[in-house]
Amino acid sequence: MELTVAGGTNIEVSDQVFGRAFSEPLVHQVVVSYLSGARAGTKAQKNRSAVSGGGRKPWRQKGTGNARAGTIRSPLWRSGGVTFAAQPRDFTQKVNRKQYRSALKAILSELVRQERLIVVDALKIDEPKTRLASQLLGDMGVATGVLVEAEPNSNLYLATRNLPNVFVLAADRIDPVSLVGAEKVVMTTAAVEKIQEWLA
């Protein structure tokens, strides 16, 4: 298949990468897995064994008139442990490499079908100025989205830092969450070639 580059020319791309059928269950699974992997999972509370103190029985078993008690750190007591205390956990959900790449292909293909993918020859600005980046995006008719380059571009990255919902990624750093959530995805022709080599 062919993709139209801004300016009128066409480039030949692989049907396997940019012309694939969309699989919502697969994309959903990969997106959930990606978001789950970003969770810290560091939430923690102290149960009765982790709270300091309480090593001695507070009073004898019988004869005081009080209810039986073995420790002052019981969850029933003030400053005691938490009954079902949260513990650190790993939220990672395993996704095979083949599944991950298939999901990226499906997302890229859907971006083409929805006309949310824009291909340009280059994304070049002379200075890391927000004004220049805003002008570059305005010329392409893009307000928010993801800019993908073959190699990291420090000028473009610095110039877009102050623009809301505009992100710059290298071609080998694209991820399903960024692509799915982007209003527009702008790629250079070099980035398209690099992504094809990676996903082919």
Image: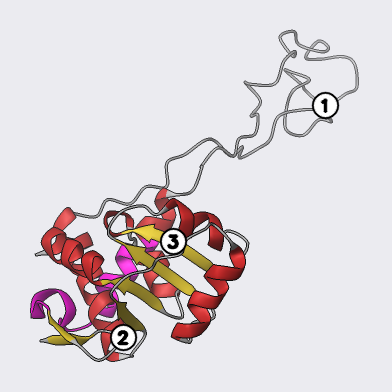
Report x, y in % for residue 22.
Answer: 23, 82
According to the picture, the residue beneath numbered tag 1 turns out to be 67
Determine whether 175 is above or below 18 in the image: above
Image height of 113 relative to 183, above or below? below
Name which residue lies at 29% across and 88% down: 7
Q: Are marks 3 and 2 in contact (CB under 8 Å)?
A: no
Q: Nearer the viewer, residue 106 or 42?
A: 106
Mark drawn on residue 124:
none
The span shown in magenta is 13-32
Residue 20 visible in image: yes
Q: Amino acid at mark 1?
A: Ala
- Residue 147 in which image quadrant: bottom left
**Residue under label 2:** 6
Q: Amino acid at mark 2?
A: Ala
Q: Is residue 59 left or right of residue 87?
A: right
Q: Is residue 134 above or below residue 3?
A: above
